[in-house]
């Protein structure tokens, strides 16, 4: 009896949860309303089956429950079930109903799948490139065609693996930031390419998702229908840190989209401009006042060592300071010191030059000022090694800077800043966002000191 009641409550609770729960589809912002329809059909059919079978079970438990019958007063058998091995009629009915239900669930899915893989002729195209743990994008240039790429061409200066000999690729537009724009109401095909492991391109509001498979180029298509900003998630669940691999699609009016695209560099522009080390060295005079003549850093000014930092990392930090993505938080007093410098360092070229010069400066390990439990630090650092390298050497392909030999007091403040959302919380800071999630692994200030003390063993 209690079991029957529990079953009825379970059914009621599930149905109520379905209708009252706040966790449902996000509002639709693409042409793929049919995906919602197929999911809803499945929900309704499996829902009806769930409700009827469970209520039937509850009914049987109640109806045929054990009854004590006194044999002296009655000939009725109160508790023994009849054995009823065959019931052809009933079996036919059950088979037919089940088949109809399964067909009703699968058939619409097949129709929608056919549409899902048939890209309309008028669709424009772009490419989304996945790598651990970052998205970047490529649009065809004026010729309307994407040039050849190959994993073998990938270097620090050719992150897309563009074929330098291919004339078609010269005008391709390369977007290294994980934020891409698309025009509204224009069908678009996304070519999906992975540089390393499996990834999965998913935009919940577009109801579209597709795996990126290393060695293959896959695709999906959709028509964004509402102007706005949407998050790209990597819905690859197996493997490390895919949840931290966020990107963004900004859906614009056509004119805004074109204005944005016009500002993006082509492969030819990127591959032909060599940084000017002489100009970079001249600009470095601005930096030496705080970071020291050798870029070794000065603790009294809170300025860390910058000698030897990776060019791309430095460029990104300088752009972040300039654009108020880093150093603009009211509690970030040290970061605020960097912001005025970027007024003097005008333009992306100046940033490029000084960053290139900084990479050439020899990096001396900095004195140890932070002590902690090195063994505990080693255990904690296992989580960090995947991005920053087993010896804290940094991995440029993952956008993670070197930590070994860096001013240790500075590493401590940065980890605290990430943890307290003073660094990394800006909505355009998608790498800082990764570090904010990672810094939460370190439960308190002591653990921060421990992991930095362990990093001090690499020098
Ligand atoms: Cu991923």
Image (cartoon, rainbow, N blue to C red):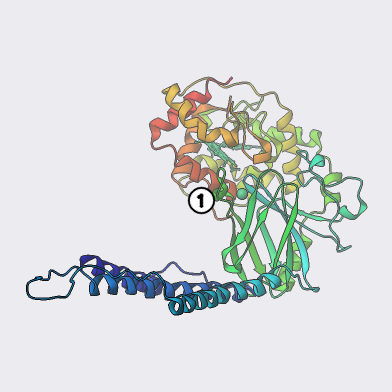
At a point 77% along the width and 47% down the height, the residue shown is 160
Can residue 327 be seen here? The reply is no
Is 133 situated above or below 15?
above
Figure quadrant of residue 146: bottom right
> The residue tagged with tag 1: helix, strand or loop?
loop
Q: In which quarter of the image is the C terminus?
A: top right
Is 17 situated above or below 153?
below
Task: Estimate the x, y position of residue 184 in percent, counting from the top left.
Answer: 68, 73
Task: Compare residues 303 and 19 and report the one nearer the observer.
Answer: 19
Q: Quadrant of the N terminus?
A: bottom left
Q: Give the total number of marks visible in the rendering.
A: 1
> Is 15 positioned to the left or the right of 245 in the image?
left
Task: Estimate the x, y position of residue 37 in percent, counting from the top left.
Answer: 56, 76
Figure quadrant of residue 85: bottom left
Is 121 situated above or below 139?
below
Task: Estimate the x, y position of residue 457 in percent, counting from the top left.
Answer: 53, 20
> Is 125 positioned to the left or the right of 94 in the image?
right
Task: Compare residues 322 and 187 and report the one nearer the observer.
Answer: 187
Figure quadrant of residue 365: top right
Binning the other alpha carbons within 10 Å of mark 1 as few (below 14), some (14 to 19) or many (20 upward) gives many
At a point 68% along the width and 53% down the height, the residue shown is 212
Can residue 27 be seen here? The reply is yes
Task: Estimate the x, y position of residue 81 in percent, counting from the top left.
Answer: 27, 69
Task: Compare residues 173 and 365 and report the one nearer the observer.
Answer: 173
Task: Compare residues 68 and 147 and report the one nearer the observer.
Answer: 68
Q: Mark 1 points at which residue?
A: 425
At a point 61% along the width and 60% down the height, the residue shown is 202
> Is 17 positioned to the left or the right of 235 in the image?
left
């Amino acid at each position: 009896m209690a079991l029957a009641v529990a079953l009825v409550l379970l059914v009621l609770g599930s149905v109520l949860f379905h209708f009252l729960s706040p966790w449902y589809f996000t509002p639709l912002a693409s042409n793929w309303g049919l995906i919602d329809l197929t999911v809803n059909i499945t929900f309704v059919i499996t829902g009806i089956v769930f409700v009827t079978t469970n209520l039937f079970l509850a009914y049987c438990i109640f109806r045929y429950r054990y009854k004590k019958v006194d044999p002296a007063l009655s000939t009725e058998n109160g508790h023994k079930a009849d054995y009823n091995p065959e019931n052809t009629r009933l079996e036919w009915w059950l088979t037919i109903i089940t088949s109809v239900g399964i067909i009703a669930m699968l058939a619409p899915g097949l129709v929608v799948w056919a549409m899902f893989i048939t890209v309309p002729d008028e669709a424009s195209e772009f490419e989304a490139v996945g790598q651990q743990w970052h998205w970047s994008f490529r649009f065809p240039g004026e010729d309307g065609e994407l040039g050849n790429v190959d994993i073998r061409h990938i270097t620090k200066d050719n992150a897309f693996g563009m074929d330098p000999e291919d004339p078609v690729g010269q005008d391709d537009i390369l977007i290294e930031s994980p934020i891409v724009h698309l025009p509204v109401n224009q069908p678009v095909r996304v070519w999906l390419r992975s540089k390393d492991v499996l990834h999965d391109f998913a935009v919940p509001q577009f109801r579209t998702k597709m795996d990126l498979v290393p060695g293959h180029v896959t695709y999906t298509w959709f028509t964004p229908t509402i102007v706005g900003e949407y998050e790209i998630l990597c819905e690859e669940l197996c493997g490390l840190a895919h949840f931290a691999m966020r990107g963004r699609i900004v859906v614009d009016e056509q004119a805004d989209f074109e204005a944005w695209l016009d500002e993006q560099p082509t492969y030819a522009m990127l591959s032909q401009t060599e940084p000017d080390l002489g100009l970079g060295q001249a600009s470095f005079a601005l930096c030496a006042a705080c970071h020291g003549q050798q870029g070794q850093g000065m603790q009294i000014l809170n300025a860390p060592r910058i000698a030897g930092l990776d060019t791309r990392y430095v460029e990104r930090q300088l752009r972040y300071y300039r654009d108020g993505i880093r150093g603009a938080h009211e509690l970030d007093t040290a970061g605020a010191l960097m912001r005025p410098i970027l007024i003097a360092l005008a333009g992306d070229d100046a940033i490029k030059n000084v960053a290139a010069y900084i990479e050439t400066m020899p990096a001396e390990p900095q004195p140890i000022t932070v002590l902690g439990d090195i063994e505990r630090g080693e255990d904690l650092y296992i989580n960090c090694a995947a991005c920053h390298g087993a010896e804290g050497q940094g991995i440029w392909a993952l956008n993670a800077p070197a930590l070994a030999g860096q001013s240790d007091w500075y590493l401590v403040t940065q980890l605290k800043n990430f943890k307290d959302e003073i660094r990394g919380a800006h909505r355009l800071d998608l790498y800082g966002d990764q570090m904010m999630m990672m810094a939460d692994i370190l439960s308190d200030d002591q653990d921060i000191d421990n992991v930095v003390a362990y990093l001090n063993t690499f020098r």
